[in-house]
Image (cartoon, rainbow, N blue to C red):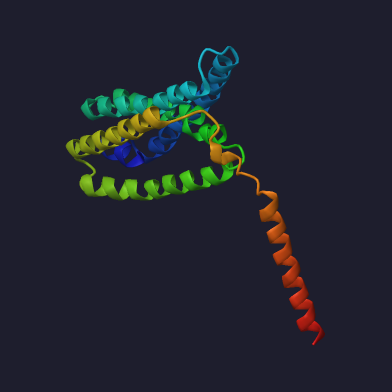
Amino acid sequence: MPTYMGSILNFDIKKNGSLSAVPYLVMWIFSIFISWVSDKALERKMFSIGTARKIGNSIAHWGPGLALIGLGFAPSDDPMLPLGLLILSVGLNGASFVGFQVNHIDLSPNFAGTLMGITNCVANIMSILAPIIAGKIAPNTEDADQWRIVFFVAAAVYFVFNLFFVIFGSGEIQPWNNPAPKNDNEENSVEQSDGNKRKNFSGESGE
């Protein structure tokens, strides 16, 4: 984003640094607001948990996707419109906190930390690949047409992956959240095996 703002919108480096932080400030504020709205909707039973998560995730992904498409067609000679679309595309990401991010707890309260670790690892891999791919698509950072392709690719990723979430996502606790307890025979077998190991170890130590 700072590269686009500097190369295409021609913001100087000082303004660029401050303006680059604005979208994330908007995202933070919006995440607080949308979290409150989502909780109120769930309290009033307006939606199921799964539906609420899908709505939040759609706002966080399809909203920015549309903003990026608009950004691809926005004239660069008037920087305020592209800047507004950039702020909108990042700011709406705040709804992801009531979308897929909190969905880990919905699916498995017992393994939410593990799930978050897995998904966050994948997300960080994508964050590494994204600038590399963008650099391949737009090697000339001053070419608005190349940036348009970058925005369209990002919008497509937003659309496809959120569509997958909308179709297959769930707000229900999964069966594997509570592993089946071992039966008495298995427990006795384990205890007997442990006892034999201790006896063998004691015998070897005595020798």
The quarter of the picture where residue 134 lies is: top left
Q: Residue at x 41, y 32 (%)?
A: 19
- Percent of width and height locating residue 178: 61, 40
**Residue 10 in view, yes or no:** no
Q: As rendered, which of 110 and 25 lies closer to the eye?
A: 110
Q: The N terminus lies in which quarter of the figure?
A: top left
Q: Nearer the viewer, residue 100 or 31?
A: 100
Q: Residue furthest front?
A: 185
Left or right side of 30 for 144: left
Depth check, front residue: 149 or 79: 149
Relative image position of residue 195 (x, y in whole percent):
76, 67
How many numbered marks are there?
Answer: 0
Quadrant of the snapshot with the C terminus: bottom right
Task: From this view, report whether residue 206 is shown above or below residue 154.
Answer: below
Residue under the point 27% across and 40% down: 7
- Asked if residue 104 shows in the view, the reply is yes
Question: Toward the viewer: 56 or 179?
Answer: 179
Whole-percent x, y for residue 196 in the image: 73, 70
Residue 154 % position (x, y): 29, 36
What residue occupies the far bottom of the structure in this picture?
207
- 114 to the left or right of 154: right
Q: Is residue 106 left or right of residue 22?
A: right
- Residue positioned 31% across, 25% down in the render: 67
